[in-house]
Amino acid sequence: MSRVSRLRPGQSAPAALRFAIVGPRGLEHVAGEAEALAAIVQAAGYEASQLLAPVDDWDGQTPPPRPADADVVIVLGGDGSILRAARWMGYDQVPVLGVNLGRLGFLADVPREESADAVRGILAGRFRLVDHLMFETEVVREGAVVHRELGLNETSILAGPPFSMIEIRLVVDGEPATTYRADGLIISTPVGSTAYNLSAGGPLVRKELDAFVFTPLNPHTLTNRTVVDSAARTYEILVSAPNAGSACVVDGRVVTGVLPGDRIRIRRAAPRFTLVETGRHGYYGALREKLGWGGGLRGAETPASRGGA
């Protein structure tokens, strides 16, 4: 389960609040930003640990050690850094403030120039905590679970080389649902709906919802369209004749190749990923800013664009 944090919206920070500042060492501005934010936290009388490591360490088998009893994790970088941090925390999730030193930044929402104010806002209780769905992907081979992966964005079943289409069966709570003949299938959370899923033509799904999004990649049948279903169900993917290079990918990382007879099981995980939001903008404001969504509404701050008269 997610750790019970001492962080409380609307209340000044308790005396023992502990911050962990993490990010990929070597990325431009990360070290300097970590020093600056740690200084703000420490000047206010709180503890801040800096845990910067090369990207290869975050993605490898020996990630940086977890700090003891952290209440807030400040992630420096981009959305990729957020995904690494969520994987690093595993089943012991801690609220995350994402500081965007990358490009798009849906999850790493706070721009660098506003990071100091965001941290001061946390110390003053000016924030909200928003929980998001996480999932488990299990690969069952010959009746045994051979891989288990915790994820935040999506699981993808990819046809791979020699790049011919494969048949992908979807089973929902033990009931056969459909068979896709396609280059692959993306099973996305709402958080991941603006990532790989969106690029493949999937829908935007509000990130607080508890649902899974199923988007086939280049389906052979035109009636195969994206489906959105409840996260309360258990989903199984079966590929009877995978290609030699077919793979199961979770949050952009290859978990394993797919062999005939494998069953890939996806279901809601017990921990929740929690973002610390400082009220910079709402959901639709983020879409307009990050995607240029909304045409003439981008950047507009007239009463009409806010729903006023």
Image (cartoon, rainbow, N blue to C red):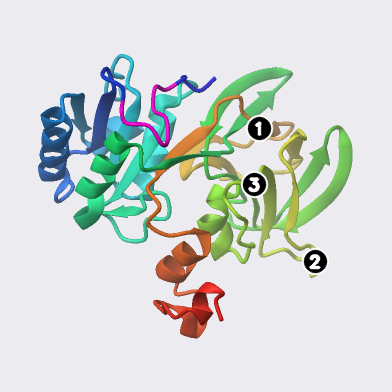
Magenta stretch: includes residue 130: no
Residue at the spot 35% in from the left edge and 24% down from the top edge? 71
- Tell me the residue that label 2 is attached to: 221
Residue at the spot 64% in from the left edge and 46% down from the top edge? 209
Tell me where the magenta segment starts and ends, as one range: 5-13
- Identify the mark nearer the N-term, 3 or 2: 3
Residue at the spot 29% in from the left edge and 37% down from the top edge? 124
Q: What amino acid is labelled 2 in the image?
A: Thr
Q: Are marks 2 and 1 in contact (CB under 8 Å)?
A: no
- Tell me the residue that label 1 is attached to: 268
Secondary structure, mark 1, is: strand
Q: Position of residue 298 (x, y in %)?
A: 43, 78
Task: Name the residue furthest bottom.
Answer: 296
- What is the CA distance from the residue labelled 2 to the residue labelled 1? 29 Å
- Tell me the residue that label 3 is attached to: 209
Badge 1: residue crowd in 10 Å (few <14, some 14–19, many ≥20):
many
- What is the CA distance from the residue labelled 3 to the residue labelled 2? 29 Å
Work out whether residue 96 can be spotted. Answer: yes
Foreground pick, 263 / 277: 277
Secondary structure, mark 2, is: loop
Q: Quadrant of the N terminus?
A: top right
